[in-house]
Amino acid sequence: MRQLARRGFVAGAAGVVAGVVAGVTAAGDAVAAPLQGSGRHAAPSRHDAHDRRVARRELRGMWVATVANVDWPSVPGLSAAEQQAELIAYLDAAVERRLNAVIFQVRPTADALWPSPYEPWAQYLTGVQGQDPGWDPLGTAVREAHRRGLELHAWFNPYRVANHTDLSRLVPTHPARLHPEWVLPYGGKLYYNPGLPEVRRFVQDAMLDAVRRYDIDAVHWDDYFYPYPVAGQVFDDDATYAQYGAGFPDKAAWRRDNTDKLVREMAARIKDIKKNVQFGISPFGVWRNAATDPLGSDTTAGVQTYDNLHADTRGWVKKGWIDYICPQIYWNIGFTAADYAKLLPWWDDVVRGTGVDLFIGEALYKAGDPAQPAAWQDPAELSRHIDFAAAYDQVRGHVYFSGKDVVTDRIGAMQHVVTDHYRNRVRPPR
């Protein structure tokens, strides 16, 4: 989110992908000086980090967002051929930058980018919810990604229904219109109510349809569980709590249990269908601040997933419910409230001994944004992140938000990463 993790949606520019891809293949072998410091928290030089990691499997991914046409399609209503060309250009861009995974958003708002029997076609394709675009984006993405040696992680949002609160704007056959009792408005959006068992079952069924039908490499969720807090607004699930909350000390504990159930049940059902499909979650980067909980990170973040989103992200790792976690550590090294150099070691310690892979979500979209702190005006900031992470053996890769920023690379931050660290392609850690 641009506010906290990925919230800022920016409109795509048609044709931006294909025109930029060719310029990346001539990346050089520049070597930068090591970061200052000593001990385990000091990163090695980029040359040393590269030498240590070149033969090691690691994830190098990018998110391709479809909600509000953030990345793809650049605008709704393109022809099927134009949409396919744009999508394939993103896959080619990933190859050119020596990435090995694309995390493709296929269920942005209780809809689908494949012919789902559960939910309508996403409006971001044609401009009209429920209208068949004339091709199968998910099926094409899986096929074309695999042809290029890329993993395809299908990215789903479990509970967001619409970026407005008007049920009548949804297609008449939308499950939210057929079951308005499932839906709650909050913060100018509509959400499925996570406290309803029938909702949890339905959203799982809708997502698992893609697992059954396609050779995806992973099911991927982002940071949206219970919605981010909105000042002065109430997520009105009192009636649901009264019905199902007996035995819990408070509503927050009940809500966390609802999210736990969603994660635990989905994990088991994925493996029942296809044991080789991974299940990964990319949460907001702060579980809890240390001032709230001594097990928490040395941060003073205004949002804590455990308390505000009712998502016990640390607990899911410790219980082994997921295959990988990709915290969105979307802050620069030295940022006071949430320092990259403090959060990454904290997550490294969390996953140690669990068997859960740790990938780091990187805020490429901030690089060169004049609204961001000075560190993000330096094209080398993200490359320093990769340097720093090389000293932590639990970190198995990095994922960049988002695809359009990987391609346009406003100030060359992605090029720095490619030049300094991605000289050769490597396999994902499978």
Image: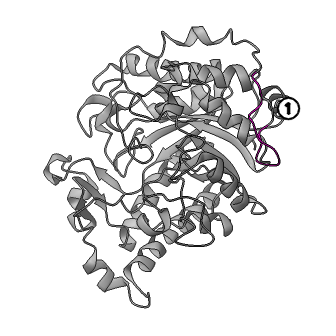
Which residue is at the front of the view, 214 or 226?
A: 226
Q: Position of residue 112 (x, y in %)?
A: 38, 43
Q: In front: 151, or 30? A: 30
Quadrant (top left/top right/bottom left/bottom right) for the C terminus: top right
Residue placed most toward the observer, 3 or 314: 3
In x, y percent, where is residue 12? Answer: 36, 24
In this rendering, the answer to whether 2 lies above or below 272 is above
Residue situated furthest bottom in the rendering: 247
Horizontal and vertical percent position of residue 223? 47, 53
Q: Is residue 41 magenta?
A: yes
299 vs 271, left or right, is: left
Main SS category, magenta section: loop
Determine if residue 214 is in view: no
Q: Which residue is mark 1?
A: 55
Residue at (36% x, 59% y) in the render: 227
Q: Is residue 50 above or below residue 346?
A: above
The residue type indicated by label 1 comes to: Ala
Query: In the rendered view, does 295 fall on the left or right side of 311?
Result: right
Dot 1 surroundings within 10 Å: few (below 14), some, or many (20 or more)?
A: few
Q: Is residue 309 magenta?
A: no
Residue 201 in picture, x, y percent from top left: 43, 66
Residue 356 appears left or right of 75: right
Quadrant of the drawing holding the N terminus = top left
Identify the image quadrant of residue 67. top left
Query: What is the span of residues highlighted in magenta in the rendered image?
Result: 32-43
